[in-house]
Amino acid sequence: MDLASLLGQLTPSPGMLLLIIAIIAMLESLAVVGVLVPGVLLITAAASMAGHQELALPAPLLAAFLGAVAGDSASFVLGYTQRERVTRCWPFSRHPEFLARGARFFQRQGVPSVFLGRFVGPVRPIVPLIAGMLHMPPRTFLWANLASAALWAPAFVLPGYLLGRTWDQLIEVPPAFHQPLALLAVILLVLVVTFSWLRHHASRNGRAYRLCAGLVRRQPLLRGLWLRQSSDGEVPLGSLLLLILALGGVSGWTLHVMQHGLQGPLPIDRQVQMLFEAIATPTLTLAGQGLARAGDLLGVVALALPWAAWLLWRRRLDALWHIITGLLGISMLNVLGKAMFARPRPDTPAHLADSFSYPSAHTSGAVVLFGLAAAFAARELAPAWRHWAYWAATLAVTLMALSRLMIGVHWFSDLVGGALLGLVVCALVQLSWQARARPALAPCPWLRLAIASLGLAAARIAWLPPI
């Protein structure tokens, strides 16, 4: 049995799906757990499945409402009954700033903080705990909890539910492709959640980091290597793991392509190509062509130019040099790979007549550009907000990669190889950057630079031909 058939059989029943929605809503509201769990993404995916199965709307709304109430209530009871012990337990013993941030918000807002806190990401799972520790009257907390959950449930469930009810009608997906498309969505969701979890636990205070540190302390040779890799007292374990996994992944995937699909597509390539041919519309094709222009050489220059100018103005040549090195490095690897493998494209327009297919340069370049941007931005953000930078980069890269399938100039396996190759370059650049302590890049006019980048990219798409 293949993976797609297995997932089809594992599709949850309506009752199980409602339970999953309730559990996600509860975990998203639990103390600390809600910071680590990508609740918005998970609740949207679950609500979309509910809409696609045409469950009556009140059912998922009620499940989300009850789960949210239960999560906040559990956090409140924990703070109310274990007030003295909370600060001594992990993770608050290692991250006292979690409680401090919630306490400041509670002190500023007072009783309404329980209502407002549910909609404020960094303090959402902490405020009910703080309210319990400060012995807020349980009846007052209950009313605020019920009122906020009554608004939170439709705000987070309705978009996903609407998407599930309408996506197949909007893009007219034939029934035969429902299962492959669901498989692709599940794979993307699992990858995003896994990356988020690993990124957190590979940081200095994460479990994976502490486990590795404990192991190397027992071995003198490993301890010396570990200390030589540290900057500011922290070993870049996340970047090292990324390099190992991405390098192994791109090597294994490239060998698979060489053995089974160098002169033609893999079986999965044919299936994905048929899927995108089935869902193609003039609007989606036009969007794919626009993204293709935004991801070529001129597009990358347009996106990066405002940031490069700002780094020059700030005299941060170290950051600028690392970014330029990463982009030049991935360009050289793409040219070398295409020349070495000479894999034909599924469709070759005139401007790509002399270019081969593997790996996808648009995908690998987008991974390096947006991946490095997310890594640099995340260092300037509070820990609770860092995952948003990586998720935004993941969304941008996914759209860029899928645009190559929409316009039919790459196989799916080209995108996988390009993404893994881009991650290798990202990891190498990050290891070089983290080799020594560096001053922060902030303050930075993020919004103005982002608007300038998008404006230049839009001008490139509108006025210049593809290259």
Image (spheres, rainbow, N blue to C red):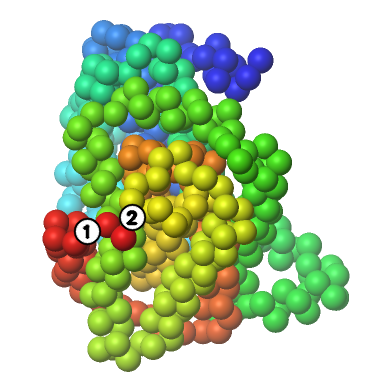
Q: Which quadrant is home to the N terminus?
A: top right
Q: Which quadrant is home to the C terminus?
A: bottom left
Please give the label number shown on residue 465: 1
Residue density around tag 1, few if under 14, some if 14–19, many if 20 or more, within 10 Å: few
Q: Is residue 250 above or below residue 115?
A: below
Q: Is residue 46 visible?
A: yes
* Residue occupied by mark 2: 351
Horizontally, residue 349 falls left or right of residue 5, namely left
**Residue furthest out toward the bottom:** 315
Residues at circles 2 and 1 in contact by the CB criterion of under 8 Å: yes
Please give the label number shown on residue 445: none
Q: Which is more N-terminal, label 1 or label 2? A: 2
Residue shown at the point (71%, 58%) measured from the top left: 211
Place of residue 289 in the rendered image (x, y in percent of width and height, measured from the top left): 26, 46
* Label 1: element kind: loop
Residue shown at the point (34%, 22%) measured from the top left: 278
